[in-house]
Amino acid sequence: MNDLLPATSVTPLLLRDLSRMRLAFFCGQTLVLLFAEFYLYLQLPWPSLLLTLILLATLHLHTVKRLRDHASISDQEIFLQLLADGLLASMVFYQSGGASNPFVSYLLLPICFSALLLDWRQTAVLVASSALLYTFILLFPMELPPDSHTPINLINVHIWGMWLNFLLISLFLLLFISRLAGTLRQQQALLHGAREQGLRDAHLLALASEAAGLAHELGTPLGSLQLLVDELAARHEDDDTQADLQLMTRQLQLCRHNLQAMVQRSQQDSSVALPCDQWLLQTLNRWQLMRPDARFALHNDSAPGIPLPVLSPPNTLALALLNVLNNAADAAPGQAVQVYWQVDQVQLRLRICDQGRSDAAIRLARPVLPMVGRSDKPHGLGIGLFLTLTILEQLGGELQLEALPAGGSCCMLRCPIASLHKERPA
């Protein structure tokens, strides 16, 4: 199931966004400190402030190097970096006004990052450490008396600083936190799809196991039926009976041939490369042998003069097409199944239309898994559509069913040409 998830983890994405947020904080605080020094004439402790800013820049460069090296990044490393961010930011605030620094609410951002992806225990430790640091700079402030040449009221500066801080925090949440949340939702959707795919694969494996056992068991009854047909042919010489017995013989031979072919395909899934139209006609003729009572009409909707690609599709694609053809023939007995095909260099499209019930699209709207063992046909097993959907998904295609305005329904099979070439990937 993990193979279905994207190779890119959320952790490097989080670390990259954290590094960008740290760089923005470093540049912003540097500008604010220079503004306070040269415009507000505040007497700042520059030696210790520069040391703190250098540590912050060093942490940023270390993170950039880790990302460039594509190293494995653990949640523990993210947690330690968030702790370091909170500590260094608190040191900057402590030396530039303490709790009265309008940008002190920046301490909430590392907590937001932690709450998104890290364990709740790590987030609780981060919350506790940030609260302790905030309490310390509140109870033990470093007084910064303004110079007598301060040109404006510091209270107004503080209020405008809070306004600017609100805008910056909102921008950080929009650019970083919301994007991370969207990535998490996307991964959750992928994980949900992977779980559904795993369930479908489990059902398919169970069906394959049952089919293997059934194929082994069918050899004896088919042989017995062939002996009975031969005996009946010897006893009854009238033309009608002989015609029926010949039909039974062809059907029994077809069953034995299909069982042998299934065993051969399981050993090596290969097929002869054919032009698209020949492969389709070959599959339809095979279906005609299976369903001598059914009829079909083939229509080419491809653009005139387009070169037909030579394909070697897996044998499972023919099985999917046969399932759809059988459903169409059962939906409208005695009427010809209309088969429309269209091909280009990108995609193969097949439309199988019948004049049966037009509410067939409702059946396809049901969840895939409940289709197994359930069918709208009196003697159906509910397996054909499930297998068809699974086969097309494995080939990167899709299946759609729609009701026709004049009655009946059409089943659309789409499959990319890239998955149908002889040298298709395993």
Image (cartoon, grey):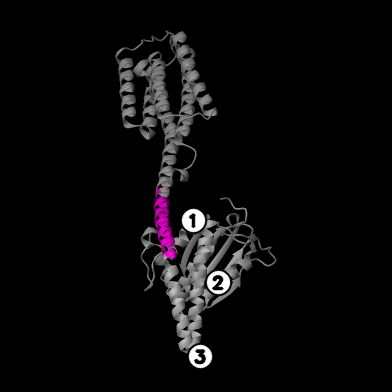
Is residue 407 among what the camera can see?
no
Q: Residues within 10 Å of mark 1 (few under 14, many from 20)?
A: some
Q: CA distance from mark 3 to mark 1?
A: 48 Å
**What residue did someone put label 1 on?**
393
Q: Tell me the amino acid under the disc marked 2.
A: Arg
> Which residue is depicted at the point 46% across and 88% down?
235
Residue 25: x %, y % from top left: 46, 23
**What residue did someone put label 3 on?**
239
Query: Can you say whether 29 is above or below 150 in the image?
Result: below
Please say if the residues under marks 3 and 1 sit with CB atoms less than 8 Å apart. Answer: no
Given residues 43 and 346, the one toward you in this image is 346
Q: Tell me the amino acid under the disc marked 1.
A: Glu
Mark in the foreground, 2 or 1: 2
What secondary structure predominates along the stretch shown in magenta? helix
Is residue 172 among what the camera can see?
yes
Tell me the magenta residue range. 195-216
Please say if the residues under marks 2 and 1 sit with CB atoms less than 8 Å apart. Answer: no
Given residues 241 and 284, the one toward you in this image is 241
Q: What SS does tag 3 mark? A: helix
Earlier in the chain: of badge 3 and badge 2, it is 3
**What residue did someone put label 2 on?**
286
Earlier in the chain: of badge 2 and badge 1, it is 2
In the image, farthest residue toward the bottom: 238
